Image (spheres, rainbow, N blue to C red):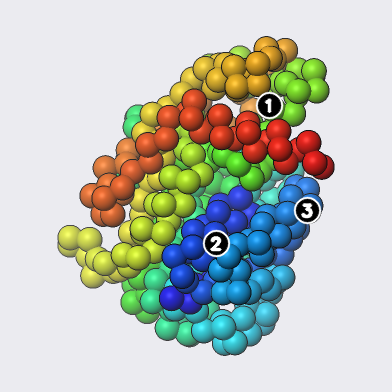
Amino acid sequence: MKILVTGAAGFIGHETTLKLLARGDTVVGVDNLNDYYDVSLKEARLQDIVKHPQASNFKFIKLDLADSSATETLFKAEQPESVIHLAAQAGVRYSLQNPHAYVQSNLVAFTNILEGCRHHKVEHLVYASSSSVYGGNTKLPFSEQETVDHPVSLYAATKKANELMAHTYSHLYGIPTTGLRFFTVYGPWGRPDMSPILFADAILNNRPIKVFNHGDMMRDFTYIDDIVEGVVRVLDKPATPEAGSNVPYRIFNIGNNAPEKLMDFIGTLENAFGKVAEKEFFPMQAGDVKATYADTNALEAWVGFKPYTPLTDGIAKFVTWYKDYYSKS
């Protein structure tokens, strides 16, 4: 199968591309390599893909998906059978500082992806949503059946908008679309703006880590391999209408279904590094939520899989990679 993977130099895009290549797919990877975080990490991920035994089936194109003409040219030239859309401007807190980046990357670019799928008969569009869409919801675990009408950040609002936009294209043009609400993804090759690397860097360099809401938070930390397994399984089963609908549209949570207290997460990192962190406690940040917890029953019923990696195992693998990668940089 020929698959377009957007955000191929990103955390999830890199790992998804490797898995697709390993099973024999042809992958066209797209990324704009922006400087939201260290571009050298994105370039290193691409180099890691190039080292794959099946790298001859990989083609990388540097492209800004917010450019409608360039995106149309991409679809016309490559004619992908399916699309995994992972490119986005990520980060809840950054959306408070630079909202225009989210409009361009998460709304304009997604419109261009939908148009490409529409005009080039793409068989299935799988795209990244986020647990952040649950926003002000307090009923745990978060279920896809609950309404998500109270986002608490612009990032969350753009992800909810993506789900609505996908539904519209599925309704109007019959394009099977599946949105995946990712829950706090971590692991090797992770983003340096997320807590595992922020905390690891602070611990090893004797700097205090910032602990928000005075540590009274919970997150459904989900290991990268589980995320990728879910993405690929969902890709292979295009969305069909749910009961009472004629729209080929689905939404699934992908989370570990086992939330961890933030202080326990920090303790697991400390144990893995063999070093206690100095901590500075702060109030809740604007746009943040106290707890996330994924109900994964729908995903398991659909593809026979749900994330399962224990935090201690995932952190051990992350720390091994972190020490290796950052000792060389």
Q: Callout 3 environment at 10 Å: few (<14), some (14 to 19), or many (20+)?
A: some
| Amino acid type at mark 2 | Thr
Q: Residue at the bottom extreme?
A: 76
| Amino acid type at mark 3 | Val
In this rendering, is residue 303 above or below 271?
Answer: below
Tell me the residue that label 2 is attached to.
Answer: 17
Label located before the other in sequence (2 or 1):
2
CB contact under 8 Å: marks 2 and 1 = no
CB contact under 8 Å: marks 1 and 3 = no
Tell me the residue that label 3 is attached to.
Answer: 39
The answer to whether one can see residue 213 in this image is no
Nearer the observer, 322 or 91? 322
Tell me the residue that label 1 is attached to.
Answer: 199
Image x and y of residue 71, in percent: 63, 78
In this rendering, is residue 79 above or below 282?
Answer: below
Image x and y of residue 26, in percent: 51, 74
